[in-house]
């Protein structure tokens, strides 16, 4: 079943039923799709892509937390990543599965950075969720020392893409490939 949204524009009226039935890649309402909601709630890594200070690409897997409005990742203050994001805050994030067919959530936008004293609350939540309460608390206790500073990296997506290789494919996927996956 296609994810459906209200379409009131004249443009949508001229599209075929299958095109009008689902938001186009880039539409932030795709965050409400079942695939996006499943990936945002799953214990997966987010892959954060950004440009380094020297302009070359970087890609880092990171734990993340979805607040319902933004993707939050934590980092330690004073790192190259924070320096780079301050200089070039435009990023892309991918959250995906490795099983077949893959499910992929792609996000783009500009991050906000907020430096805090001590452990970032969202970072603590991510660590406990990923490591379990006992191991997560032990890790947090080990790093919670005077002078620790963290940076909250928040992304409110301005572009969203979803692929499930059943009903949502990359736009120019050839028909034989769609058929091989069982898609329409």
Image: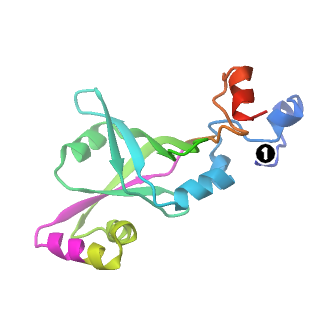
Does residue 79 sit above or below 70 in this rendering?
above
Determine crowd level at label 1: few under 14, some 14-19, many 20+ residues with C-alpha closer than 10 A. Answer: some
Residues shaded magenta: 138-157
Does residue 150 sit above or below 104 in this rendering?
below
Q: Position of residue 8 (x, y in %)?
A: 84, 43
Residue 73 location, quadrant: bottom left
Describe residue 48's horizontal placement relative to residue 18 as left or right: left
Frontmost residue, 69 versus 1:
1
Q: Residue at image x 55%, y 62%? A: 68
Residue 106 sits inside the magenta stretch: no
Describe residue 12's horizontal placement relative to residue 70 as left or right: right
Residue 64 location, quadrant: bottom left
Frontmost residue, 12 versus 180:
180
Q: Position of residue 133 (x, y in %)?
A: 34, 78
Q: Residue at image x 42%, y 49%? A: 46
- Secondary structure under tag 1 reads loop
Q: How many marks?
A: 1
């Amino acid at each position: 079943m296609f994810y459906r949204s209200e379409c009131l524009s004249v443009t949508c009226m001229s599209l075929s039923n299958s095109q009008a039935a689902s938001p186009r890649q880039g539409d932030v309402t795709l965050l409400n799709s079942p695939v996006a909601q499943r990936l945002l709630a799953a214990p997966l890594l987010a892959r954060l892509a950004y440009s380094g200070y020297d302009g070359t690409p970087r890609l880092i897997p990171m734990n993340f937390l979805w607040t319902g409005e933004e993707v939050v990742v934590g980092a330690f203050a004073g790192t190259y990543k924070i320096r780079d994001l301050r200089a070039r805050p435009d990023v892309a994030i991918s959250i995906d599965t490795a099983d077949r067919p893959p499910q992929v959530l792609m996000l783009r936008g500009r991050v906000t950075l907020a430096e805090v004293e001590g452990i970032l609350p969202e970072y603590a939540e991510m660590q406990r969720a990923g490591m379990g309460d006992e191991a997560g608390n032990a890790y947090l206790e080990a790093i919670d020392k005077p002078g620790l500073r963290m940076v909250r990296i928040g992304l409110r997506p301005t572009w969203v893409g979803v692929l499930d290789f059943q009903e949502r494919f990359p736009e120019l996927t050839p028909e034989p490939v769609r058929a091989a996956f069982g898609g329409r």
